[in-house]
Structure formats: structure tokens, C-alpha cells
Amino acid sequence: MYMMKARYMLPLLALSMATAWAGERETFDFGWKFKYFGPQDPSNAGIPTASTGHQGDHPEAYAIDNNLDTRWCAPNQKNGHRFIVTPGFKDPVKLFLIYWEKPNNFEVVIKVTCWDESKNCTLSFNQGGQAASFVMMPEPAAIRYVEVSVPGGTDISQWMSIREILFTGANDEPLKVRRGPGAFVHAAVDADETGYKPVQLPHDWAIESPFLEAEPNETGKLPWKGWGWYRKNFDVPADFNPEKDRWYLDFDGVMAQPQIYVNGKKAGEWAYGYNSFRVDISPFLKPGQQNLVAVMASNLELSTRWYPGAGIYRHVWLEKTGPVHLTQWPTYVTTPEITADSALVKVQTTVSNTGNTPAEITVNQSVEGATAQAATITIAPGTEGVVEQELRIPNPRLWSCETPNLYKLQTQVTMDGKEIDSRSTTFGVRSAEWRKEGFFLNGKRVQIKGVCEHHDLGALGSAFHARAYERKIEKLKEMGCNSIRMTHNPPAPEVLDLCDKHGILVIDELFDIWKRQ
């Protein structure tokens, strides 16, 4: 008898459970347009500054935010760094102040370019130990831009770092630097789409770009840093009712920090580039009209130590359902008792009620003729209900690396005698445990022969292609591989399905960390 005891259950080294969707679930991969806006932090969009770079979380915007607690910092202590600010106003400037992070002991060169070129000037000085540089104009003038540079004299204790640049007018009045439109202007329905190009998802903007010699080797010398916008128009039928209908966008993965807007309004966001997430777009839709979804993706410096890819690099799905429905990942299947005669299958099902009234629902489960006792619960409005059921499979075909047998669990949810939702969940019957002799699968010792696989597909980049990844698994199986460590983050959902299909054990990592213990 094979029995998987609770203390030996492996939450990481596990067989995934694939979900096939019933009902109105459709691809949302087509009809997109995309534009890349450059390698900067999108929070700097519209900021009238430029520099030779910045260190970590100290971007150019911090030097003109009227906050002495923040600062722009050069990327290193080398000589020759520059900081440029374009004030954006034409009021005559009498003087301006440069507040340094620390009292400076280096040479400072300031070039002032005015709208009246006859008033251009260059100042060079070393005040020595000053916390601020007071720059008096020879005469008040309207300034186009100011360039501050440190040609020499810096060291690690005297990094070029500016807390704030403040301008004063001819009548001693403060003049505020004006910024242009920010990054989120591109979420608007009527945003200018000049420079956008049609793309099909999954899409990796970096892999389609030329190699950049200045970029580091570990990230492929490709322009993965920066930000871009995706836009897609789609129709919503006139009979759509946000009180009765629920439309969700399911993103399998966006690299990274996606912000999702529908018809110009923020519908959701996600902080992590490697796992899937859902956005309820129902409240933002306009029935009987063409609607717009816009997604901004941004990759920041120091956010990876390998090639991550960039953009909506996995599939997107549109799911249409009612207020009472199965959740995004509704079924959790385990097989805690296995013998040659039967296998006990335990199923935990989660149903959501997003409506305004209580819902009495019934859940039915079946696997190849074996059925669970129907379970009926009442779910309060705005909550989720969990149903636990079990059934037995006679003469189970076990899942193993050599014979990856799979079953399909059919889940049906009814209300008032009518089916309102259903799922088909693929799972395997197996036991797994660690003993002092090693790892045992179905009571037999298995030598783990694994590899560490990043999520990208080499020359294809990080845009997910199921057949390309399946070919990779087939080649690994030919080599004798029986397990994959998903290094160092969750893969596309289809990868776990493929590992089930081909008999691959999985260590599904969630996060990677560096520079800290």
C-alpha cells in the first residue's frame, strides 16, 4: 500500500494541476499596439531633466521635487558626470541654488544656456565644503537649460549628488520648474498613438531590438530596461450589465510592474513580473461601444541579474462570467491515500459570489465515472465559499516520470438547477516522500536528475511559445533529465502542464534575491 503522509507532502517538488476552462473564456492576444518609450524610469516621464545616469533609487526627478530629503545621485564616483535641467518657464532668473547632498570639495562647472544667446554664461568654481552653491546670473535672463558637471575632484566620499535646484526670479520670487506630461497620459482613450506598432502577444520588446554594446553580458546586452505602453480596442455588447456580468482579464505574466487602464481609468496593477494575476474590468466597461485597455510595463535598473524579457510576454485571456462563479484557480486536488485497488481523491473548490444577494450553489465532482457526493452551500454576497469533497478512483493508474498517467476532474457548479460554471482539472495520482535514503515516488526511490531552467527561450527571448518549451523538455528527457528547478521564478502556466504531460518533477521557485542574506 502506498500512503502519502502529511509530513512528507512536498509543496514545492510537486505535480501541478492544469486547468482547462469551460464557458466564455477567449484569447485576448490579438489586436494590440505597442510603443517603447526608452530606458528611463517612467516616473521621470515629463521631468525636464537629463543626466549621465543615476544610482539606484535616486533618479533625476528628485533634484527638482522641492524636497530636500530626496536627491539625484550619479551612478558612481567617477569624474565627468553631468546633470541638466530645463526649467520650462521664460521668467527672468536672478539666481539659482544647488543644494548638495554633502558639503562639496570638488570642482563644479555650470553652463547656463539662455533664450537670448548673448546672455549665455559658464561659471567654474570650487567653494570647498559648501552645502549649497549660490549661482548669481550676471544679469537676470530667461534660461533654456542649466548643465551642472563635475570634471574632477570626486571620490567615494564626495559623490556628485544633488538634493535640489531652486530658481529665483528678478523680483526675488521663487520660480517652479515645469514638467511635461507624465507617463500615464498614454492611458487616455484619445492619447496620441504616433510611433505605435501592431504586435501579437506574447511579446518581448527587448529580444526584437538590436544588441547594445554598453549593456551587461548577464542580461543579454538587450534593452530590457525602461518602459512601454500596450493598447487594444475591443467591443462590448449593448446588453452588457455590470450588475449581472463579470469580465476579467487574466494575465499569465507581464514584465514588469504592469499598470492596467480601461477607458482611461485605472483597473488594476501587479508588482511582480513572473506570476499570473487577474483584473476585474467590469466596472469600467461601456456597453455598446468600442472600449480601450492600455497596459504600461516597466523594468527598472537593478531589478534582475539575468535576461528577464520585457512587456506582455505571456498570454492574456478574457473570461466572461456571472456574479457567482468559480475563482481563477478554483480546484485544489490531492491524493492522500493510494492502494493498488483505489485512490482517494480530495477536492477543495472555491466559488465566488460578487453579487448583492446570497447564493445557494451545488458543486458536483466526477472522474471517469467515479463521483463525489454533491455539496450545497450558501455564499454571502461579496464573499467566497469553499467546498470540500472526496471520491475514489478504482485501480488507479499512477503518475511517474516513466508513465505520466493523468486524470481529468470535472467540476460543475449549479444554482437553481442550472449549470452556471464548470472546470476540467488535470491531475495525477502519486505519492511522494523524503526518506533518509532519498526521494521516493510511489514507494520507489527516484534519483533526481535535474536542471535549472530560466523562463526564457534563448534566441526566442522571453515571449512564451508552448511548442518551443515542449521541445526543450523533450530534449531534456532524451538526456535523462527527470526534474526541473524553475530558476528562479514561476514559469508560464503552460510549462507546468507540459511537465505533467512528460513526466517531469518540478521545483517551482517563487522569488530570487541578491545583495542580501
Image (tube, grey):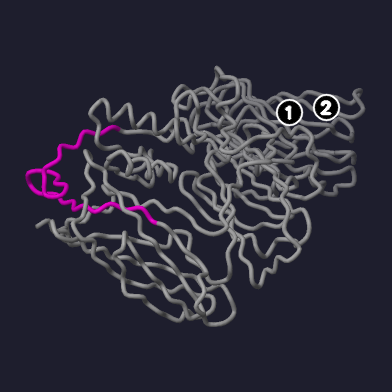
Q: Residues within 10 Å of mark 1 (few under 14, many from 20)?
A: some
Percent across and percent down for residue 108 are 67, 26
Q: Given contact means CB atoms under 8 Å apart, are the residues at marks 2 and 1 in contact? A: yes
Percent across and percent down for residue 161 are 59, 36
The N terminus sits in image quarter: bottom left
- Amino acid type, residue under disc 2 in the picture: Thr
Q: Residues within 10 Å of mark 2 (few under 14, many from 20)?
A: many
Percent across and percent down for residue 205 are 60, 31
At a point 14% along the width and 46% down the height, the residue shown is: 440
Asked if residue 102 can be seen in this view, the reply is no
- What element does badge 1 sit on? strand
Distance (Cα) linking label 2 and label 1:
8 Å
- Residue 147 image label: 1
Is 315 drawn above or below residue 4 in the view shown? above
Left or right side of 153 for 406: left
Q: Which residue is labeled 2 in the image? A: 113
Percent across and percent down for residue 289 are 78, 57
